[in-house]
Image (cartoon, grey):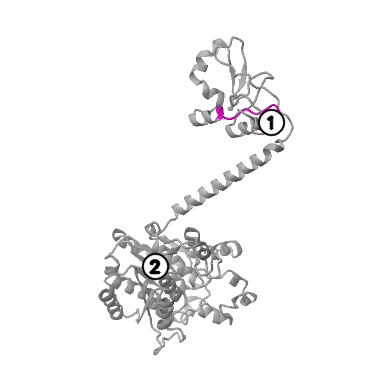
């Protein structure tokens, strides 16, 4: 056997250097008559004297090496013996690897010989690469969901936005409140995953809601089609039980199933009052907000539940604002958003036997159409609004929320999340999606660190 440094022929030796100046001298054995002292990896001192034989018989090799693992012992004894110049470096490497203390010879102060530098460096780089690959593989298995693997240039592009693309080509979804904002983006992202998406709302190309905004359900459906799905717009006022009943009948007649139902009905921007105590606010506005943003969710879930329980693996999403119990600034608004979370908790218990997950999900600071209009910017130049509000720098597009919901819908382990309130700033770590610009905004972290608030 030769030295890996200079190729000089050497004898094979044990992982612990034996006493004396000769490198090839064998380690002490039980039959030796003169006492010898060895220091073990755990700091103990053993004696080779005859009177100590019973204790050595019990520990034997494990006392010398500190390891009982057969594989590690064999690997240690099979290593080649190095020459006199290279022995200290090789011995130090063994000591680091196995925790063995070299007690028989003072190590040289010289560094690793130049002839071994490349070998040592290459070995370390290979070990780091292998460890990183194994860690990535374990992480991928832990968070694996039924995704279609994409080419690397698509995975890293701003078009995909996820490490993997969720496949919902066999799923039927309903986005209640899909006219604009978060609802529109959720519908588009479900469509991008291949789903058939029913888009409901009050504003159509021929009829406008009290919101008085230009976005329509037909436009959302066209965007779903363009993304790769099938968009079906149906005008529905979800505060009217008979209209929601007819919607459920239509879905049943056309597809016979419903796999994803997103409750994103809001329509309360014109009813929220932020100034003054609640008794100084308009009571009709406050009660109307509860009717518009809570009753509509209950009505929609009640009529669609029989369809959702028909096939296991379904998903109900309650879109809220924030996931903590903090007060949200004004009484009626706070009642709406906290009640929506409780709706998810309650529905989760009833849907659990049917393997249908119910989750409340919050976006961060949302760059919706209304918010962009408020700042007087567009999605193309939204960063100019940071001068008006520095917190706007941490905002996100509605598609960030849409991609989170699409990922959950495709996750076979979504029941792990049922009954919980979560958010985009938590889900992007689980599913590795990005916003449309390739970033991963974390509004929750910003609220904790900059605003000292729980999101």
Image x and y of residue 210, in percent: 42, 86
Q: Which mark is residue 406?
A: none
Magenta highlight on residue 77: yes
Q: Image quarter for residue 30? A: top right
Q: Earlier in the sequence, mark 2 or mark 1?
A: 1
For the N terminus, the image quarter is top right
Q: Image quarter for residue 86? A: top right
As drawn, the residue found furthest toward the bottom would be: 206
Please say if 135 is above or below 275.
above
Question: What is the span of residues highlighted in magenta in the rendered image?
Answer: 76-89
CA distance separating discs 2 and 1: 66 Å
| Closer to us: 428 or 283 | 428
Magenta highlight on residue 159: no
Please say if 370 is above or below 119.
below
Which residue is denoted by mark 2 in the rendering?
317
Q: Residue at x 52, y 62 (%)?
A: 152
Please say if 299 is above or below 346.
below
Please tell me how crowded label 2 is: few (under 14), some (14-19), or many (20+) other residues with Cα within 10 Å: many
As drawn, the residue found furthest toward the right would be: 109
Q: Main secondary structure of the magenta part?
A: loop
Q: Label 1's element?
A: loop
Image x and y of residue 65, in percent: 56, 26
């Amino acid at each position: 056997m030769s030295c890996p440094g200079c190729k000089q022929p050497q004898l094979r030796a044990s992982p612990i250097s034996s006493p004396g100046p000769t490198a090839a001298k064998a380690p002490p054995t039980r039959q030796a008559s003169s006492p010898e002292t060895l220091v073990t990896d755990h700091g103990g001192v053993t004696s080779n004297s005859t009177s100590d034989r019973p204790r050595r018989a019990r520990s034997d090799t494990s006392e010398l090496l500190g390891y009982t693992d057969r594989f590690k012992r064999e690997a240690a004894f099979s290593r080649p013996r190095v020459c006199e110049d290279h022995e200290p470096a090789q011995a130090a490497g063994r000591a680091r690897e196995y925790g063995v203390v070299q007690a028989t010879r003072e190590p040289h102060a010289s560094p690793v010989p130049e002839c071994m530098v490349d070998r040592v460096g290459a070995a370390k780089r290979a070990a780091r690469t292998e460890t990183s690959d194994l860690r990535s593989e374990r992480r991928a298995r832990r968070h694996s969901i039924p995704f279609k693997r994409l080419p690397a240039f698509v995975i890293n592009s701003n078009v995909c936005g996820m490490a993997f693309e969720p496949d919902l080509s066999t799923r039927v979804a309903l986005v209640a409140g899909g006219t604009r904002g978060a609802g529109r983006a959720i519908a588009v992202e479900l469509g991008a995953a291949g789903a058939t998406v029913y888009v409901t709302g009050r504003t159509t190309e021929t009829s406008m809601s009290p919101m008085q905004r230009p976005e329509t359900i037909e436009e959302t459906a066209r965007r779903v089609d363009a993304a790769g799905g099938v968009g079906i717009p149906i005008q529905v006022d979800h505060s009217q039980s008979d209209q929601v009943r007819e919607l459920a009948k239509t879905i049943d007649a056309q597809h016979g199933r419903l796999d994803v139902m997103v409750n994103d009905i809001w329509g309360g921007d014109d009813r929220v009052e932020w100034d003054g105590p609640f008794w100084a606010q308009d009571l009709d506005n406050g009660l109307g907000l509860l009717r518009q943003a809570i009753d509509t969710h209950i009505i929609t879930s009640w009529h669609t539940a029989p369809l959702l329980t028909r096939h296991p693996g379904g998903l109900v999403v309650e879109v809220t604002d924030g996931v903590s119990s903090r007060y949200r600034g004004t009484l009626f608004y706070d009642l709406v958003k906290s009640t929506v979370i409780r709706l998810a908790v309650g529905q989760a218990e009833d849907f659990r036997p049917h393997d249908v997950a119910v989750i409340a999900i919050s976006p961060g600071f949302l760059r919706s159409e209304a918010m962009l209009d408020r700042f007087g910017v567009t999605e193309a130049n939204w960063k100019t609004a940071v001068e008006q509000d520095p917190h706007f720098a941490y905002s996100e597009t509605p598609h960030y929320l849409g991609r989170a919901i699409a990922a959950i819908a495709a996750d076979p382990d979504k029941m792990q999340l049922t009954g919980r309130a979560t958010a985009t700033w938590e889900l992007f770590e689980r599913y590795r999606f990005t916003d449309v610009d390739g970033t991963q905004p974390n509004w929750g972290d910003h609220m904790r660190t900059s605003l000292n608030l729980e999101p």
